[in-house]
Image (cartoon, rainbow, N blue to C red):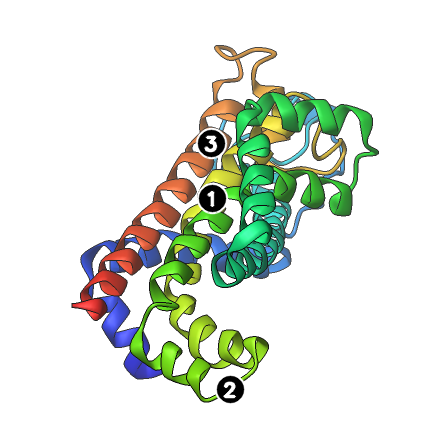
Amino acid sequence: MSRIFNIVWKNRNCRWGLVILLPVFFAGMAGGFLAPIDPIRQNLDQVLQAPSWRYLCGTDFYGRDLFSRLVNGSRITLGLSLSAALLAVLGGTLLGLTAGFLRGWVDGIMMRTVDVFMGFPRLFAVLLVAGFCRTGFGATVIVLALFVWMETARLVRAETLTIREALYVKSATALGLSKLRIARTYIFPNLVGTVITNTTLLIGTLIIIESSLSFLGFGTQEPAASWGTILSQGRIDPIGAWWIAVFSGLLIVITVIGFNLLGDGLKQLHDESKL
């Protein structure tokens, strides 16, 4: 494990990505210690307090401590995005591997399904489905994953088509090994690097989509706090209460940059390992 970490740390993009993301994950896991104030407790005597030593990020329109809400929101936003990414990657990998390995009519049906899903404007489709679904953690995860699995499926299919032509795969086929065993033993292990890299990049995309959903009122609902719901509240008075939109927006931007840097670095390491 330490060897893998050292290899990842030596890559500049990975290193900067980790430097950005590790504090965000730490804040999410240690929220109760970093932000002891209840994030949903209202204090109408402290409404719209500007950032200070007492309230590091100020307070919102209900007198709630914004720092506590941002720390608590990191768990919700990252939890939703990570869960949706894992679900989307799991489904996309399974479908892409099946399509690329079996080919024929199975490949045709699955790829046409991918084309249909990719033909819909993503955010519009997510909003449409979210509008008809009940809000909640599980429903939001499913809605997010439903419209982002296609890229993984196409990527895994393309990789599978290349790997299945390798000599060791043809040798395994000639030896009479079952298709399931060949896929599990010889093809999937060679897809792991691609899948991990794609997952990292996908999380950044999902953070933006989840924040957009919450911003428009279709994601996390008050009094719970995600970065998107906090950002949405900031639009009420973007000048007089600038700190609400600024701090939540910065967290979204910085975290997405962190995941993109980490994903780019992992992609570089993956490409170098193929040389």
- Examine the rendered structure and indicate whether residue 235 appears above or below residue 114: above
Q: Which residue is mark 2?
A: 176
Q: Residues within 10 Å of mark 2 (few under 14, many from 20)?
A: few
> How crowded is the residue under tag 1: few (<14 C-alpha within 10 Å), some, or many (20+)?
some
What residue type is disc 3 on? Phe
User: Distance of mark 1 from mark 3, alpha carbons?
Assistant: 31 Å
The residue lying toward the viewer, choosing from 190 and 170, is: 170
Residue type at mark 1 is Glu
Residue labelled with disc 1: 151
- Seen in the picture, residue 205 relative to 19 is either above or below; the reply is above
Q: Residue 13 at x, y = what percent?
A: 23, 54
Q: Residues within 10 Å of mark 3 (few under 14, many from 20)?
A: some
> CA gap, disc 1 to disc 2?
32 Å
Mark nearest the camera among 1 and 2 is: 2
**In the image, what residue type sits under mark 2?**
Gly
Snapshot quadrant of residue 116: top right
Residue bearing the label numbered 3: 247
Left or right of 154: which side holds 124?
right
Camera-side mark, 1 or 3: 1
Q: Residue furthest left?
A: 275
Who is closer to the viewer here, 45 or 144?
Answer: 144
